[in-house]
Amino acid sequence: MSARKHSVKVTILGEEYTIRSEALPEHTRAVADHYDRTVREVMNAGLVVETNRAAILAALRITGELLELRREQDELVQRMQQLADEIRPLLPPAKRGA
């Protein structure tokens, strides 16, 4: 059985879209707002005039942000594991775990 789908109306570049998603409506609106802001930033920077090209550049910018955050998260997880490995020998034997 799948999760309940929500229909949410969002506006991107002045056009209204109805999005059906399992995500909470607030999340869907936040995603659409972020995308709309990013496309507008690209267009306002004068990098492109055509909306479709601005949309592609905005998607690439957001994807770059996502990949950078994933890389940072991986580094943080690795550093936390290193710290756990350094601390484990200092713990009492019963608390050392695996």
Image: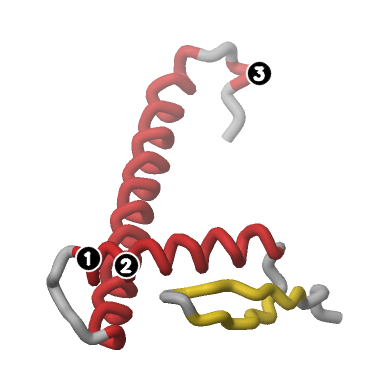
What is the secondary structure assignment of the residue under circle 3?
helix
Label 3 – label 1 distance at C-alpha: 60 Å
Marks 2 and 1 close (CB-CB < 8 Å) = yes
Residue type, label 2: Arg
Query: Upstream in the sequence, badge 2 or badge 3?
Result: 2
| Residue corresponding to mark 2 | 40
Q: Which mark is residue 44?
A: 1
Query: Upstream in the sequence, badge 3 or badge 1?
Result: 1
Horizontal and vertical percent for residue 23? 68, 67
Label 2 – label 3 distance at C-alpha: 57 Å
| Residue corresponding to mark 3 | 94
On-image quarter of the C terminus? top right
In the image shown, does 91 or 1 lie closer to the viewer? 1
Left/right placement of residue 37 relative to residue 98 reads: left
Residue type, label 1: Asn
Q: How is the image coloured?
A: secondary structure
Marks 3 and 1 close (CB-CB < 8 Å) = no
Residue type, label 3: Ala
What is the secondary structure assignment of the residue under circle 2?
helix
Left/right placement of residue 47 relative to residue 77 reads: left
In the image shown, does 60 or 85 lie closer to the viewer? 60
What is the secondary structure assignment of the residue under circle 1?
helix
